[in-house]
Amino acid sequence: MTDPSIHSLAVTFFSEILTTDQLIRARLSKVLPKGMEISHFSVLNHLARCGGERSPAQLARSFHVTRGAMTNTLSKLQWAGYVHIRPDWDDARRKMVAISPAGQRARDAAISAITPLIGEMVADLGDNKFRATLPVLRELRLKLEEQG
């Protein structure tokens, strides 16, 4: 039989993560450039970091969202001029997505806007605590991805 204190620890741990997620999202939303949502920034940042093109399906898998949700985000980014979407030359049924120069500028502006907020959090808690927490969070993410 499982120790009840383990269940309590798990519930407390995940409650902290979920509450922290909500608070971080609220703060980031306030400082992102006008009209940019966290999902928009996340996709632009991913495309900027990985370089090259990705299919909507690849992006959906990377973000653990449905293809429909990714299509919605990409439509908004395309409308804003932040991404270029073209047919896949090898398979006309598929599309390929790349960040545009305007998207790169918007991503850079978002990074500039959120960096002070993130830096302040790290300074308040200390970078040693952040470094110590990263392996646990990374291992938890990998476990969840395996099970997902």
Image: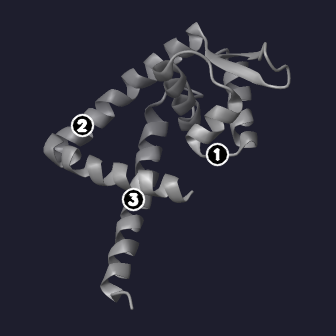
Q: Is residue 51 above or below residue 34?
A: above
By what rule are the colours in the image chosen? one colour
Q: Quadrant of residue 81?
A: top right
In the displayed structure image, the side of residue 93 where residue 43 appears, left or right: left
Could you say where residue 66 lies in the image, as x and y percent from the top left? 70, 45
Residue drawn at the location 57% of the way across and 8% of the way down: 101
On the rendered image, what quadrant is the C terminus found in? Answer: bottom right
Marking on residue 120: 2
The secondary structure type at the circle numbered 1 is: loop
Q: Answer above or below: position of 88 versus 127.
A: above
Q: Element at badge 3?
A: helix
Residue 64 locus on image (x, y percent): 59, 46
Q: Position of residue 106 (x, y in %)?
A: 52, 17
Residue depicted at x 57% and y 15%:
52
Q: CA distance from mark 2 to mark 3?
A: 19 Å
**Mark 2 crowdedness (10 Å alpha carbons): few <14, some 14-19, many ≥20:** few
Name the kind of residue labelled 1 in the image: Val
Task: Name the residue that disc number 1 marks.
Answer: 65
Q: Nearer the viewer, residue 45 or 59?
A: 59
Label 1 and label 2: CA atoms lie apart by 30 Å
